[in-house]
Image (tube, helix red, strand yellow):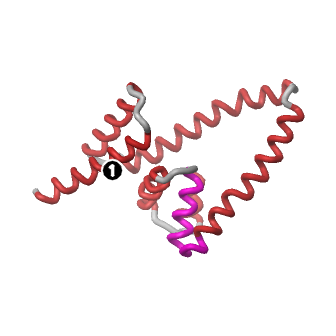
């Protein structure tokens, strides 16, 4: 996500920084990979159906080729200690990237008391109970709609 944000906001100026939390929300609400869903959303927003199809192809094709090559290499050389040591280093790096992404999105998404309460409630429920993230997304959306309708009545 940080790379996508850098590319579409800073480098290409296709969208605004304020659009990123909305894009991520839509991408996470849809089934499938967040990166692919994000690219579909951006492609469709910029160029309609042709943009969405191009975005899917642009995301899937290079990754598929790389995965096929890496799988072949891993299956052929998995017994080498160099390969095993590389995977020991890759795992924590991936966790760090995920945490960094969550931090950056959280900085933009949590901007008042209501969003902080929703975040803390969702995090608490996810950590203590086996609740589906899908249900959490639906619950967060409903909470936002209810909160907004109450705020508008005031």
Residue 13 against residue 86 in the figure, above or below: below
Classify mark 1: helix, strand or loop: helix
Indicate left or right for 116 with 48 as reference: left
Q: Magenta segment, which residues?
A: 34-51
Q: Verify whether residue 75 appears in magenta.
A: no
Q: Residue at image x 50%, y 70%?
A: 45
Q: Residue at image x 43%, y 53%?
A: 25
Q: Residue at image x 64%, y 34%?
A: 93
Please provide percent x and percent y for residue 107: 41, 46
Q: Residue at image x 62%, y 65%?
A: 55
**Residue topped by disc 1:** 141
Visible residue check, residue 22: yes
Please provide percent x and percent y for residue 51: 59, 71
Q: Verify whether residue 38 appears in magenta.
A: yes
- Report the quarter where the C terminus lies: bottom left
Residue sitting nearer the eye, 121 or 88: 121
Please give the count of numbered marks on the rendered protein. Answer: 1
Visible residue check, residue 1: no
SS majority, magenta: helix
Q: Name the image quarter holding residue 36.
A: bottom right
Indicate left or right for 63 with 37 as reference: right
Q: How many other residues sit within 10 Å of disc 1, few (<14), some (14-19) or many (≥20)?
A: some
Indicate left or right for 107 with 68 as reference: left
Residue reaching furthest to the left: 154
Residue sitting nearer the eye, 144 or 6: 144
Please provide percent x and percent y for residue 59: 66, 58
Residue sitting nearer the eye, 103 or 42: 42
């Amino acid at each position: 996500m940080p790379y996508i944000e850098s590319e579409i906001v800073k480098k290409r100026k296709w969208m605004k920084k304020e659009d990123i939390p909305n894009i991520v929300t839509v991408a996470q609400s849809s089934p499938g990979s967040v990166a692919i869903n994000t690219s579909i959303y951006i492609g469709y927003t910029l160029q309609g159906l042709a943009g969405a199809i191009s975005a899917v192809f642009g995301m899937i094709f290079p990754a598929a080729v790389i995965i096929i090559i890496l799988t072949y290499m891993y299956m052929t050389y998995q017994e080498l200690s160099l390969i095993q040591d590389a995977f020991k280093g890759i795992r924590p790096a991936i966790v760090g990237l995920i945490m960094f992404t969550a931090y950056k999105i959280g900085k933009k998404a949590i901007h008042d008391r209501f969003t902080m309460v929703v975040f803390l409630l969702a995090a608490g429920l996810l950590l203590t109970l086996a609740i589906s993230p899908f249900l959490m997304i639906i619950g967060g959306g409903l909470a936002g709609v209810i909160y907004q309708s109450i705020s508008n009545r005031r």
